[in-house]
Amino acid sequence: MSEETVAQRVIRIIATNKKMAPEEVSPATRFEDLKMDSLDALNMIFALEEEFDIDIPNEEAAKMKSVDEAIHGVEELLKAKSSASN
Amino acid sequence: MRRVVVTGVGVLSSIGNTLTQFEESLRACRPGIRPITQVDTSRLRFHNAAEVAGFEPTGHFTDSQLNWLDRFAQLGIVAARDAIADSTLTWNDELRARTGVITGSCLGGIGTEDAHYFGFYHEKKSRCSPTAVPRIMSNAVASHVAMEQKFTGATFTTSTACSSANHAIGQALWLIRQGTLDCALAGGSEAPISFGHLKAWEAMRVVAPDTCRPFSKNRAGIILGEGAAMLVLETLENARARGAKIYAELAGFGMSADAYHLTSPLAEGAARAMNAALEDGHLSPEQINYVNAHGTGTQANDSTETRAIRQVFGSHADRLAVSSTKSMHGHALGAAGALEGVATLLAFRNNFLPPTANFLDRDPACDLDVVPNEARSAEIEAALSNSFAFGGLNAVLAFRRVAE
């Protein structure tokens, strides 16, 4: 079995957060369509930080309005993290 | 009906540890928001707070007393002593038996708690001080003040997050009005600057990276504050009989629950509390000149509070002065309403409007006269002081000018 991709992990976190099946969440899904309120969003950002062991600054969090944007944001932060540790 | 007035005030905050310094800072629009000194902030996303500065506990307490006192209690007890001195009341056994102490605190001795947990979890200590429990309990200030002053009337503590102090002061008003007490020390104290607690605020992403800019378009959140303030409340009749100076009448108290959301505010809930305070104080909206706003500096609070004020005051909202002194003394959580009550009482006593500091661009969603960046001379007749807590619990005090 192949290892889970970053995108799959982000989707899994969001689906768990909203108590949905991962198949119901796609990269195109917008958070407003998931009826995410401010506390849901905070919890999701926290769960992503824990999953990937990254810090998501407020300005990056503010850019994450859809699953796709969350995946992209996490990927960028992971890149920054790995170049910082090299 | 017994009317209740404020005849003594004590305050310690980032903008002054005496009433005189506190007033000077309000008048000069001088915020006490500075880099945090009590904890290392290198692992925090924010670095500023409104800490009490220059407070030397050993100047106020013996070492054996300090063993029993978390910083929040030290601040609260000193504020109570200062308020009692300011009131110039003469105490006897009869009055002491009919005096209560009603205090607000959101966090109690969280600094003590944090230090003990650090000891257990990180330093692997096997025991902690036997004074830990009484240091941590949120009613420490009420109990210590009662013991120190021999006040034996109704005494307790309210803990309703950011509304704690207003709920405490409001209960004190009603207990005196209904005849349970003749006199009360009421207010709040808070010392939230502990690393574990600051991390919890960081996770909520509501703390501003630089400063607190209530009602400004680009406001970025709260600045946590530390402090304590206590009021001496007594009947108007007693205050007049002894020729006391009177700051103002505490005319009314209103509270409500949003029953809506843990952290998002609801304009209707805030408006119901303001209306309840007006009704309790037999005040019409048109009599109010000044509102000391909850004004936290978050995007959600300030626009929602503006809508609530417009709901309550209608077109009179355009003739109101509305300011947030949190822009100077920070958000002192369970002490917030007490600090803001003092700012409001000084406005009555010395005829000025405390400003909203750090104000930049206007926000169309906060289209009120927020007294930006400069205190203003004004004689106010009546005022509200708003506190709206996480958890949707709202508490509003109404004050009115009264002849001495």
Image (tube, helix red, strand yellow):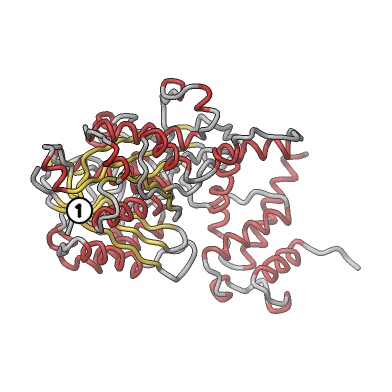
In the rendered image, the quadrant that contains the N terminus of chain B is bottom left
Q: Which residue is mark 1?
A: B383
B40 or B258: nearer the viewer: B258
| Residue B249 percent location from the top left of the image | 18, 50
Specify the amino acid type for callout 1.
Ala
B202 or B335: nearer the viewer: B335
Q: How many marks?
A: 1
Tell me which corner region of the image, top left, top right, bottom left or bottom right, holds residue B90.
top left
B209 or B225: nearer the viewer: B225
Residue A81 shows in this picture:
yes
In the displayed structure image, the side of residue B56 where residue B90 appears, left or right = left
| Farthest residue, direction right | A1
Q: Residue at x 58, y 32 (%)?
A: B40
Around disc 1, counting alpha carbons within 10 Å, would you say few (fewer than 14), some (14 to 19), or many (20 or more)?
A: many
A34 or B377: nearer the viewer: B377
| Residue B315 percent location from the top left of the image | 16, 66
In the rendered image, the quadrant that contains the C terminus of chain B is top left
In the displayed structure image, the side of residue B247 where residue B56 appears, left or right = right
Figure check: B283 above or below B71: below
Residue B340 shows in this picture:
no
Q: Residue at x 47, y 32 (%)?
A: B35
Tell me which corner region of the image, top left, top right, bottom left or bottom right, holds residue B275.
bottom left
Provide the secondary structure element on which disc 1 rests: strand
Q: Residue at x 26, y 37 (%)?
A: B26
| Residue B96 percent location from the top left of the image | 31, 40
| Residue A16 percent location from the top left of the image | 70, 69
Q: Chain of mark 1?
A: B
| Farthest residue, direction bottom | A24
Tell me which corner region of the image, top left, top right, bottom left or bottom right, holds residue B244.
top left
Q: Residue at x 91, y 68 (%)?
A: A1
